[in-house]
């Protein structure tokens, strides 16, 4: 039964998609277990709340800094090697983080984990986009994203059981799920995959005859700038602003407890999960631009709902709309990057795309928090989020379609 389900789920997709989706699930499962306890564990060293938050921020900061070197490595040694080595770095650093005896040790090890995470995300996305043909690129991206989403949903549930043993236990479980990801990538992906001299892949998209695509070439394309802007907008709103302000909004404005906030995040994730694969198919059959327009429009509407209405019902409505838009924004922009790079190696091109999302995730909470403190309310932060989403919507509307017309008809 499982085999039939897998065959249906990954039908017409290269084997690499199934491997990468499995890896994504393992990574997200472990991260969902450890993420809630990281600042709590940091506080056990007697540090301030700001210092405890720095443990979270240093991971994102090192991802941002390491993305460009990771893209260079992808072009030099291939996706497979960069992928499993990056995962191994996160696994080992997480295990030692669980053993750390001082706050500086924990901070350094989490930063090292961010470097490995950048290597993993850049190489996996580069491999995914380069090995899938244009007719299935949107669906493949949605399938890959579903691995992260499902793992992220399961992680906190498992984490509640693990943390009961010890505050350090989640770090070791996270390291274990990462080692599963390492072994999956190492043994299930062909040796030399993506290496300019050793690629053994039989994928028609994995040609090594074309030279790598340089970032200067991509920056000349309006579609690339559109994808960058949308990824930045998504990082600022769907990840940064949502994670930092909405829990406080629920407590301070709606006068509800943390359970209401968590339920909102849950329904948002479920809505996104339900639409991920249909959104990917739409990007393949109707084109990338319609998917981008739907996603950015939904994100803008969700932000405007939060600006206009302060009620529990509209909070849940906004979260559902945000989840639905996230399905299109998970498949569409990445598919555009895949169309631009094609079968060429484009590590720096993919790395820059990943960096914009990380930058938004880092900057979003800071900007939102500043506006909240200055204005004393939540209207302006949500309005700025709506403005950023509206800008990306306008860019998507005028973006040239990147998928070839003959592929659209397939």
Image: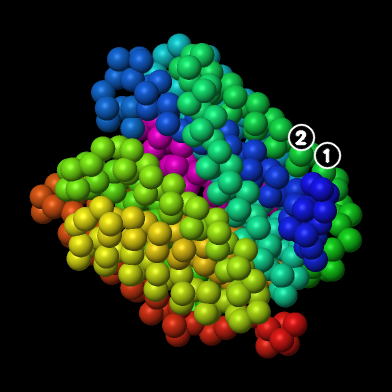
Q: Which residue lies under the disc numbered 1?
A: 187
Tags 2 and 1 in contact by the CB under 8 Å rule? Answer: yes
- Left or right of 397? Residue 91 is right
The answer to which quarter of the image holds residue 401 is bottom right
Q: Is residue 97 visible?
A: no
- Disc 2 secondary structure class: helix
- Left or right of 196? Residue 383 is left
- Disc 1 secondary structure class: helix
- Which mark, residue 98? none
Is residue 73 covered in magenta? yes
Crowding at mark 1 (Cα within 10 Å: few <14, some 14-19, many 20+)? few
| Start-end of magenta stretch | 54-75
Q: Measured along the vertical axis of the image, is residue 128 above or below residue 154? A: below
In terms of depth relative to the viewer, which is nearer, 129 or 248? 248
Is residue 386 covered in magenta? no
Give x and y (percent) for residue 223: 52, 77
Residue at x 44% of width, y 83% of height: 397
In terms of depth relative to the viewer, which is nearer, 184 or 104? 184
Q: Measured along the vertical axis of the image, is residue 307 above or below residue 164? A: below
Give x and y (percent) for residue 258: 30, 37
Q: Which residue lies under the disc numbered 2?
A: 183
Q: Main secondary structure of the magenta part?
A: helix
Q: Is residue 302 visible?
A: yes
State the CA–CA distance, disc 2 to disc 1.
Answer: 6 Å
The C terminus - image quarter: bottom right
Residue at x 33% of width, y 20% of height: 43
Q: Measured along the vertical axis of the image, is residue 262 above or below residue 406? A: above
Residue at x 53% of width, y 74% of height: 291
Crowding at mark 2 (Cα within 10 Å: few <14, some 14-19, many 20+)? some
Give x and y (percent) for residue 263: 38, 45
């Amino acid at each position: 039964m499982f085999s039939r389900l897998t065959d249906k789920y990954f039908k017409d997709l290269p084997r690499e998609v199934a491997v990468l989706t499995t890896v994504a699930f393992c990574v997200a499962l472990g991260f969902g277990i450890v993420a809630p306890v990281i600042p709590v564990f940091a506080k056990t060293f007697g540090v301030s709340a700001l210092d405890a938050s720095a443990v979270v921020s240093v991971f994102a900061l090192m991802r941002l800094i390491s993305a460009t070197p990771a893209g260079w490595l992808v072009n030099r040694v291939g996706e497979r090697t960069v992928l499993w080595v990056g995962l191994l770095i996160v696994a080992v650093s997480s295990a030692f983080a669980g053993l750390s005896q001082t706050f500086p040790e924990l901070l350094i090890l989490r930063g090292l984990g961010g470097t490995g995470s950048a290597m993993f995300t850049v190489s996996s996305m580069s491999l995914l986009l380069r090995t899938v043909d244009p007719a299935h690129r949107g669906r493949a991206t949605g399938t890959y994203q579903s691995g992260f989403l499902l793992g992220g949903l399961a992680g906190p549930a498992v984490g509640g059981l693990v943390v009961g043993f010890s505050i350090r236990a989640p770090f070791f479980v996270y390291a274990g799920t990462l080692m599963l990801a390492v072994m999956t990538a190492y043994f299930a992906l062909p040796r030399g995959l993506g290496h300019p001299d050793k690629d053994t892949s039989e994928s028609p998209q994995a040609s090594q005859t074309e030279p790598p695509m340089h970032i200067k070439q991509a920056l000349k394309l309006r579609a690339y700038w559109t994808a960058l802007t949308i990824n930045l907008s998504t990082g600022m709103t769907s990840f940064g602003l949502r994670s930092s302000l909405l829990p406080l909004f629920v407590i301070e404005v709606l006068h509800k407890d943390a359970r209401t906030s968590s339920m909102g995040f849950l329904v948002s994730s479920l809505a996104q999960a339900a639409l991920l694969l249909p959104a990917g198919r739409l990007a393949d059959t109707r084109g990338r631009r319609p998917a981008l327009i739907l996603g950015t429009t939904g994100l803008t509407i969700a932000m405007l709902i939060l600006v206009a209405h302060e009620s529990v019902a509209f909070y849940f409505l906004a979260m559902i709309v945000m989840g639905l838009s996230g399905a299109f924004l998970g498949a569409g922009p990445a598919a555009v990057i895949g169309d631009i790079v094609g079968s060429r190696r484009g590590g720096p091109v993919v790395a820059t795309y990943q960096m914009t999302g990380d930058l938004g995730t880092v900057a979003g909470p800071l900007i939102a928090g500043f506006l909240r403190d200055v204005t004393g309310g939540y209207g302006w932060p949500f309005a700025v989020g709506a403005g950023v989403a509206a800008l990306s919507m306008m860019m998507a509307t005028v973006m040239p379609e990147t998928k070839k017309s003959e592929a659209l008809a397939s």
